[in-house]
Amino acid sequence: MSTTPSIAADALRRAGVRDVLADGTNRAAYSTDASLYRLLPTAVVRPHDRDEVLATLSVCRELGLPVVARGAGTSCAGNAISSGVVLDFSRHMNTLLSLDAEAGIAVVQPGIVHAALQRQALAAGWRYGPDPSSHTRCTIGGMIGNNACGSRALGYGKTSNNLLALESALADGTVLRTSVGAPRSDVSASAPVLGELDALVGSSLALIRQEFGRFGRQVSGYAMQELLPENGFDVTRFLSGSEATLAVATEATVRLVKEPGRRVLIVLGYADIYDAGDAAAGLLPFAPIAVEGMDRRIVDVLAARRGPAAVPPLPRGDGWLFVELAGEDDGELQRQAELVVAQGSCLDSMIVTDPVVSASLWRVREDGAGLSGRSPRDLPAHAGWEDAAVPPAELGPYLREFDDLLVEHDLSGLPYGHFGDGCLHIRIDFPLAAPGGTSRFGDFLDASAELVAKYGGSLSGEHGDGRARSGLLPHMYSPQAIELFARVKQIFDPDGLLNPGVLVDPDAPTAHLRIPAARKPAVPLALRYPHDGGDFAQAVHRCTGVGKCRADNSGTHGVMCPSYLATGEEKDSTRGRARVLQEMLNGELVSGWDAPEVHDALDLCLSCKGCLSDCPTGIDMASYKSEVLHQTYKGKRRPASHYSLGRLPQWVRLSRKTSRLASTLSGVGDRFAFAKKLAGVDPRRSIPRLAPRTFRAWCRDNGVPLFDAANVEPGQVVLLVDTFTDYFAPDTGAAAVRVLRAAGAQPVIMERDGCCGLTLISTGQLDEAKETLGSSIDELDLAAAQGLSIVGLEPSCTAVYRSDAHELIGGEASDRVAGAVLTLAEFLSSLPDWRAPDLSGRAIIAQPHCHHHAVMTWSPDAQLLKAAGADVRRLSGCCGLAGNFGVEQGHYEVSVKIAEQQLLPALEASPDAVLLADGFSCRTQADDLADRKGLHLAQILDQAL
């Protein structure tokens, strides 16, 4: 009899485990990690302490359920998924237990995020050495499991090199405590399993010395070399990289290192990536802390997706090495940097000492993991063969043969990696969804494994073998070494409870693939998905699982993902939602657009579009949510808020001739909670009052003419009249008219009372939205076709014409309008003779609208304000209202919690500062929660004229 999720959950709770998830939504959200593989877990346990880990292992032994440990779920090889119980350490066991600032030693729980440890270590004058590109969300426990490294492993070593002690639980409930440097005899006597392990190593010395520890990045398989007598029978470092197949880490003691006083970055340019690979090993005598490589492919993709400004100037060439030196003496570092350039045999070079410039260059490399989720052919690119390593001296020849192999198999990807370590990262556009795609994937893996073995390399250099490469280990190791792995597993985990299918008795690399299991929707789609060939399945599988949506991205002014930052729940992350939608397409657990699991996952999605710009793979969860709502409610009764808030523009237009009456009625409704509840509105929300006079009426009285296609005059610019500006905030429109006139432009407005359909889009009323938006585009195209700019004031409406229209409608007219629509800052900055008015000394708190950030970018606004001399504090993240989201019943608490992350603390800390918020919803949130009035950029500029 199989163990059902409810049986497992009941048994776990009876055993004292407090946080158990066995519902369909969470099982779907945890069905995969950052890999190609999927296994539906029976349950997810988020332990609070070691005792709950031991209780979970006890229940799983009794029920015969496998167990896998998981940190942030950023494992690229399928290391952190299971059909049994997933132990998620990131929720509760995420604490820094102690930090010895004198000795540079920290004791941590396995779920602590790397960035959280780093913050506290830096504050104490230290740093944690290894720094993988996922450092903003990966956990130390996950790094131990994979023996992760990062860009600066040359200087600081792998995770195993920075482990001092480990507490771990064995499958039988034994708690193992090991430490680096303990006498071999003491270690061997401390536990029966370690005595057996010592005996096994003693009988296999020649084999281990011959096949293991041949170069620094030989991470595949078990690290048997750590157990050699000459290496002190180091069980602690041996367990690092065992991928939770032997033990589950519950506590770790790690070594910290001193932050160097000075750093210098040398960027070397080469004709191609092969020449860069040839040169890397020759730079190691200079003791760099990093030697990273990439080529033109990744630079071109970055420029194409984020604009040319996203790529800082690079030395001449099509391949580059980033070489970082560290030390205390500027003169000595400069001398060493010049020697690196001389030794590097490069075409061109640059030595960078400015930390700001250096950070911008490193960002290109750091974004590689996410950017590589689309291949140079703009096809989905996948992990699976993303982490091979060879001895550094062999890297150049290996790269040449590997590229030939890609061509032979008609595949492509974006290569980059830790060239000083001989490690290459690349995601490849395997045609997994095509007929025969799985076989082609398997054939390529076999050929690639043979190539790595030819160069004496490792299938994995830091990501671990997982499900992707464990089955390929016989290409790299002898049968005797493979048997040795099995005997080690038998000692530690004789019943195969811990992460079965990985490393020992592995599943085939072609088993449990998630993409071939997905099916295309059978119903016609409302959105076009032009960037995914019209394929909704491909769109949701854009999510590679790198987990940037689980990070606090405020340091780079990111928005994604506000709901996850508020709740900390995987299902409320962009990744979790994508996983549930992927399972919907699979149909095994989640069935249909109206499945409760789908709506549970999407309920707290704010449709902020932060993921559209911040997710490296370009996920657009706001659009997917609109599609789900459209498919679910098409021809059916909808939630009340869809009628009240989703059709708000229609309601206010109906009141056009009776605005005073409508305003009075809205005021009455604002006082009676039952009226709000009937409309699906949270009673704690105030209802914005309609303005006494519309913006269109103001235009008539102030000489703003209607656009006349037959009489277009020089200097004319169309001012987009959106619902919010027209009916609720006409003062914003009036200020924009004055600013535009002062800039020498002649603002005009369109004759028809059009609408972009934003509220219809966000509530999934896509047929009506298409009709509404299409009519507005047809009218605006009369101006766009004559070359006029169209200035939008409400960011969310502006973004519809720039982005959503392409998804919903497309066509030449839509493209012309998208190209003509500008923000106020964009338009003013395009005028060659315009100069910003003096805002010197003006303290401004800027809350960019999420859609502004995601679609248009806020950079022109920032540059304008800087030129004006304003003292600007730019907030990150979302205000929390997000259109109708924060107004709807059931969302108030999360909406407020999001506002408490950035907006409310900033307003409280600076009571005299001006709040700049172009978005009507952002101004409403500040007014509602902090009694603070916000101003549009047009109003701030108008006041300074």
Image (cartoon, rainbow, N blue to C red):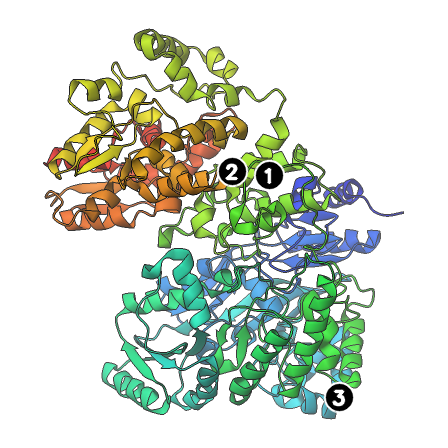
Where residue 202 is drawn, which disc sits there? 3
Q: Mark 3 and mark 1 in contact? Answer it, CB < 8 Å.
A: no
Task: For marks 3 and 1, give the one nearer the viewer.
Answer: 1
Badge 2 density bin: few <14, some 14–19, many ≥20, Cα 10 Å: many
Q: Helix, strand, or loop for circle 2?
A: loop
Where residue 362 is drawn, which disc sits there? none
In three-dimensional space, the C-alpha distance between marks 1 and 2, rounded to whole angstroms, equals 8 Å
Q: Which residue is found at the position 43% from the left and 30% from the top?
A: 773
Front residue (pair 59, 478): 478
Where residue 601 is drawn, which disc sits there? 1
Task: For marks 3 and 2, give the one nearer the viewer.
Answer: 2
Q: Is residue 919 left or right of residue 534?
A: left
Which quarter of the figure has residue 780?
top left
For badge 3, the amino acid type reads Gly
For badge 1, the amino acid type reads Ala
Expressed as whole percent of the image width and height from the top left, the position of residue 772 reads 45, 27
Q: Helix, strand, or loop for circle 1?
A: helix
Expressed as whole percent of the image width and height from the top left, the position of residue 400 reads 54, 83
Q: Is residue 336 visible?
A: yes
In three-dimensional space, the C-alpha distance between marks 3 and 2, rounded to whole angstroms, equals 57 Å
Expressed as whole percent of the image width and height from the top left, the position of residue 266 reads 33, 79
Q: Mark 1 and mark 2 in contact? Answer it, CB < 8 Å.
A: yes
Q: Helix, strand, or loop for circle 3?
A: helix
Expressed as whole percent of the image width and height from the top left, the position of residue 784 reads 31, 38
Q: Is residue 248 left or right of residue 934?
A: right
In the picture of the structure, the residue carrying the numbered disc 2 is 605
For badge 2, the amino acid type reads Cys
